Image (tube, coloured by chain):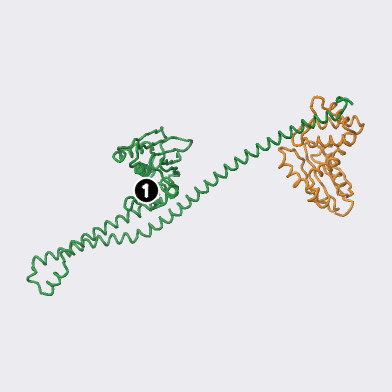
Amino acid sequence: MSNDDNPYIKAYEREKRARLEAERQLEDSSRIIYKKNQALEDSYEKLKSQQALMLKQEKLATLGTLSAGVAHEINNPLAFVASNVSTLQSYLQLYQHVQTLLETHYPRETMVPALRSYLEANDFEYINEDAEELLEDTLEGLKRVANIVQSLKNFAYDQPAKRQSADINEGIESTLKLLKLPLEHIEVEKHLAPLPNIDCNPSELNQVILNLLTNAADALDGRSQPKISIKTYLNGSEILITISDNGCGMPESVVSNIFVPFFTTKDVGKGTGMGMSISYGIVESHGGSIEVISEEDKGSEFTIRLPVT
Amino acid sequence: MKGIVFNILEEMVIEKCGMAAWNELLETALPDEDGAFTAGKSYPDENLFALVHAASAKLETPAEQIISGLGEYMFGELAKRYPIFIEQAPDLKTFLLSVDQVIHTEVRKLYDDPNLPSFEYTQLDSGALLMEYRSPRKLCILAEGLIRGAAHHYQTPITLSHPTCMHTGSDHCDLIVEFGDEQ
C-alpha cells in the first residue's frame, strides 16, 4: 500500500497537529497560571502591608483614646494644684511681709530668748528665699505638665475644629521663614505646584510642617551636603506634600514607632516625643494620612496626603 | 464546541467504520479544515453538525439517531477519561443528579467558556427523575444518548421520555427518566 492510500498516514498527521496544538495550549495555560500566581502573590504582599498599616493605625487610635482619657484625668487635679500653688505664693508674700514688719519693729535683741533661738536655729532667711524658689519651680513644673497634657489632647485631636480655606503652599513658605536660622546651612529645594485652597486648620498644618522640617534638620546635623526637598502636588482629589532629607535616616524599629506618643530618639530633655504623634493626629483630623519611608544613612521621606475638600 | 466532542465522534466512527471512513467524512464535511481536533480547544458548532449530517447521508441514518448514538458512545469515553465522577456516584440517579453541580462545575475549572447546558431536577412522586434541559445548542438528543449511556454503564434499565422539547417551541426540554429498578 502506498502512503497515499494508507488512511493512517493522514490520521497520524492529524494527530500530530492536534498534539502540537495541545502542547501549545498547555504552555498558554501554564503562562496564564504563572501570571495569575504572580498577581496573587503581589496582592498578598499588598494585603500584608495594608494589614500592618491597619494594625499600626489601630494602635495609634487606641493610644489616642487613652491619651484623651489620661489628659482629662490629669487636667482636673492639675488645675487645682496650680491654683493652690499660686495662692500659696501670695500667702507666702504675706508671711514674708509680716516677718519683715516684725524684724523692723522688734529687732532680734528685743525678742524673748526662746523665739530668738528658734529663729536662729532654723535659718529663716534661707527658708524664705528657698520657699519662693520652690514655689516658682513647682509652678514651672506644673506648666510643663500642662503642656504635656495639651500635647496629649492634640494627639487625640480633642480640639474644636477651626477650619478655614487656605493654601498649603503659603503655609509651607511661612513655616520656612520661621525656620530660617535652623535651616541656615541646609540646601532647601522647593517644588510647590499650584494647589487649590482646602478647608483646614492652617496653624495646625503649619505645626506639622514645622515638626517635619525640624526633624529633618536634626537628621542632617553633621552630614555633608545637607539637603531638604519639599514637594507639593495635586494627585486626583488629593494634595500630596513630601518632605525628604538626605540625613541619617532611621532604622525600622524607629520608623514603626515614630507616631507613638512619647517615642523619641532624642536625649532626655531634648524632645517630648510628642511632635510626630501630634502631627499624625492633626493630619488624621483633616481626613488625611501621613507615611514615612526611611533608609539608614540615606535619609527619610514623609508623605502627607490631604483630601481636597 | 470543545474538541473532545469531535475526538469522541472520531473514535466512534473509526471504531465502527474504520479510519478511511473518518478521513472521507472530514473531506466531505469540512473540506477547508485540517481535521485535527484538540480536546480543550473550541471549534465551531457548525463543524460538528456538518460531520453529523455527512455521516447521516453516508450511512443513510437520520441525524438524530447519529447524535443519540454519539451521546451513548460519548458516555463510555468520558467515563474512561474521567472515572472519578462515576466512582463518586454509586447509582444512576445519584450520577444524573451530580451532572449539573458536580461534573459541570469541574469542567468549568478546566475549560474557559465551555458553553455547557444547564439541568434543573425534580424528583417525581413516582420515583422518576425530571431533568429540565436548557442549552442554546438544543442538543437534547445528545443528552438523551448520554443518559442512555449512563444507564447502560450502571446496568440500570430506564424508560426515557421527552414530552416537552425546545425543537417544538418550548424554552426547555423535559427529560423524564423512569428507573426500571428501585433506586
Amino acid type assigned to the residue bearing label 1 in the image: Gly
Indicate the chain coloured green by its letter.
Answer: A
Q: Secondary structure at mark 1?
A: helix
Residue situated in front as seen by the camera: B24 or A145: B24
The residue carrying mark 1 is A275
Residue situated in front as seen by the camera: A6 or A77: A6
In the rendered view, does A180 fall on the left or right side of B105? left
Q: Position of residue B41 (x, y in %)?
A: 74, 34
Answer with the quarter of the image where residue A193 lies. top left
Q: Position of residue B103 (x, y in %)?
A: 76, 45
Answer with the quarter of the image where residue B66 lies. top right
In the rendered view, does A285 fall on the left or right side of B49? left
Q: Looking at this rendering, what residue extends furthest in the front direction?
A: A1
Chain B takes which shade in the image? orange
Say few, some or many: other residues with alpha carbon within 10 Å of mark 1 (under 14 / 14 to 19 / 20 or more): many
Q: Position of residue A304 (x, y in %)?
A: 43, 41
Can you see residue A202?
A: no
Residue situated in front as seen by the camera: A98 or B29: B29
**Is the residue A91 above or below the residue B37 in the image?**
below
The chain letter under disc 1 is A
